[in-house]
Image: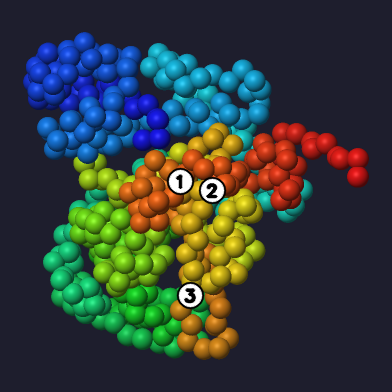
């Protein structure tokens, strides 16, 4: 737990009352004092790790489900913004922040909204100097809206998980048979056939549905793993249209571009849930200590698909490790991101150049692990590697990207990548920032831009 205090007051009270227990009765069952229960319920004392383990053993629940509350996310956001340089030296401590959450939740929400607006305008003004009009580009606001939508839902959609499970693919023992099983489902349930076409015909389109012939046409540029994923994606788009639409937030329904983008990402989520069923994937992930390569073999999917799926394991009572996912191109541009951790990922431009995900292009297919520390002193273990796009001819070779999967360091020992890693050793830690415009580190030799809130002093030479 890396010394972090865990406050579970409201959730513990809810758990106790749901079982019809008094504080004294619960205390007796867990062999602690009634006064201890009272203090924990009122957040006047943090829950010890031993107490959390007793809760887990006695009630058969995941204690992280108690700690992972909306207030926990809000507290992380408050801690992040209180480390902004605009706060100066008068930074509130964690107890002040908790008190604000408990006593003035509406004020806290308003403060977060004001700060996010301030940050957004600052970043947009900074971008204008690099690209005319970038701050007003509607595509940027759509991308941010999609990212915020998934993060606000903790990158987990129980209705999509249930719908994917209803298709029966979790009963397949040999994952190599997934393609034929999906093909049979499309034929029997949706009356849809499958055809293949040369990629010159489809162009950049990986797959398309011809409603006239009732056929899904797959590009021959797809390898087996991506053919399977495209079939699962099409099942979502064609067979579960209403369910996808039901997930859309009201605030974005009037924006056609945002709706199309959200439908695409929700269908991708469904596809991952279909070919990597939650219960089986979660069990294998825990057993394999989140060994990505091992999971790719067991589920016959790609490295990137496993990384995506690991970020979605947030089902209450059966949560996995919270991960963030980042994908970049050779130019350092962020092309995809998902996040269920407190870390703040870059909104515009590229990721911090001190992250090893950039170095991966020099050592293709090799996994690089790195412990990074944000300006707010939070630390994360990252797993970085290149991934390749399918290629069917010489001109398509080397379509390479790099991905980074990261988790808070307190979970590092639960992974195969964190075994034996001293996450507190200074030599193992790389200080990073969100990006140059947002980073307060004034002494970074790799800084490309001034922070948008300050001018750097020029040295005498």
409 shown above or below 303: above
> Disc 2 versus disc 1: distance between alpha carbons?
7 Å
Question: What percent of the width, then of the height, locates residue 334?
Answer: 56, 57
Residue depicted at x 18% and y 67%: 169
Residue depicted at x 31% and y 62%: 272
- Residue 251 quadrant: top left
Q: Earlier in the sequence, mark 2 or mark 1?
A: 1
Name the side, left or right, on which 269 lies relative to 400.
Answer: left
Q: Earlier in the sequence, mark 1 or mark 3?
A: 3
Q: Nearer the viewer, residue 459 or 107?
A: 459
Q: Residues within 10 Å of mark 2 (few under 14, many from 20)?
A: few
Residues at circles 1 and 3 in contact by the CB criterion of under 8 Å: no
Q: In the structure shown, which secondary structural element does the residue marked by tag 3 occupy?
A: loop
Name the side, left or right, on which 219 lies relative to 353.
Answer: left
Residue depicted at x 48% and y 57%: 369
Is residue 30 in view from this perspective? yes
Q: In the structure shown, which secondary structural element does the residue marked by tag 1 occupy?
A: loop
Q: In the structure shown, which secondary structural element does the residue marked by tag 2 occupy?
A: helix
Name the residue furthest top: 35
Is residue 241 in view from this perspective? no
Q: Residues within 10 Å of mark 1 (few under 14, many from 20)?
A: some
Question: What percent of the width, then of the height, locates residue 419?
Answer: 38, 52
Q: Nearer the viewer, residue 144 or 312?
A: 312
Query: Looking at the image, is mark 1 or mark 3 nearer the viewer?
Result: 1
Name the side, left or right, on which 229 lies relative to 205.
Answer: left
Query: Looking at the image, is mark 3 or mark 2 nearer the viewer?
Result: 2
Residue depicted at x 51% and y 80%: 203
179 shown above or below 75: below
Residues at circles 2 and 1 in contact by the CB criterion of under 8 Å: yes
The tag on residue 422 is: 1
The tag on residue 389 is: 3
The tag on residue 428 is: 2
């Amino acid at each position: 737990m890396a010394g972090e205090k865990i406050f579970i007051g409201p959730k513990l009270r809810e758990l106790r009352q749901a079982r019809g227990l008094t504080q004294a009765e619960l205390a007796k069952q867990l062999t602690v004092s009634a006064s201890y229960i009272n203090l924990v319920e009122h957040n006047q004392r943090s829950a010890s790790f031993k107490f959390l383990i007793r809760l887990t053993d006695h009630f058969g629940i995941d204690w992280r489900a108690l700690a992972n509350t909306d207030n926990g996310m809000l507290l992380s956001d408050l801690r992040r913004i209180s480390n902004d340089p605009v706060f100066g030296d008068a930074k509130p401590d964690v107890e002040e922040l908790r008190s604000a959450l408990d006593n003035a939740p509406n004020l806290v929400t308003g403060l977060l909204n004001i700060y996010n607006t301030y940050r957004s305008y600052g970043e947009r003004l900074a971008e204008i100097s690099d690209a005319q009009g970038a701050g007003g580009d509607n595509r940027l606001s759509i991308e941010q809206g999609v990212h915020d939508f998934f993060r606000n839902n903790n990158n987990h959609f129980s209705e999509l998980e249930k719908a994917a499970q209803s298709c029966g693919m979790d009963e397949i023992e040999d994952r190599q048979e997934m393609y034929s099983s999906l093909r049979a489902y499309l034929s029997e349930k949706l009356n849809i056939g499958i055809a293949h076409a040369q990629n010159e015909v489809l162009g950049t389109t990986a797959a398309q549905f011809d409603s006239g012939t009732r056929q899904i046409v797959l590009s021959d540029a797809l390898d087996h793993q991506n053919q399977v994923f495209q079939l699962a994606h099409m099942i979502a788009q064609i067979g579960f249209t209403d369910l996808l639409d039901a997930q859309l937030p009201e605030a974005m329904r009037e924006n056609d571009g945002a709706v199309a983008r959200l439908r695409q990402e929700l269908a991708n989520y469904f596809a991952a849930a279909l070919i990597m069923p939650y219960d089986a994937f979660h069990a294998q992930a825990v057993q394999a200590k989140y060994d990505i390569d091992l999971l790719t073999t067991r589920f016959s999917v790609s490295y990137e698909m496993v990384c995506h799926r690991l970020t979605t394991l947030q089902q209450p009572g059966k949560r996995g490790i919270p991960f963030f996912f980042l994908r970049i191109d050779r130019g350092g541009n962020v092309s995809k991101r998902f996040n269920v951790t407190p870390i703040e990922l870059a909104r515009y431009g590229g990721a911090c150049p001190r992250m090893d995900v950039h170095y991966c292009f020099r050592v293709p297919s090799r996994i690089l692990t790195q412990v990074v520390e944000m300006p707010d002193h939070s630390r994360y273990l990252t797993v970085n590697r290149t991934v390749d796009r399918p290629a069917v001819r010489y001109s398509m070779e080397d379509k390479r990207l790099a991905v980074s999967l990261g988790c808070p360091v307190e979970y590092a020992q639960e992974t195969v990548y964190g075994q034996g890693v001293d996450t507190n050793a200074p030599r193992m830690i790389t200080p990073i920032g969100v990006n140059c415009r947002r980073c307060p580190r004034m002494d970074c030799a790799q800084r490309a831009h001034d922070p948008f809130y300050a001018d750097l002093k020029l040295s005498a030479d």
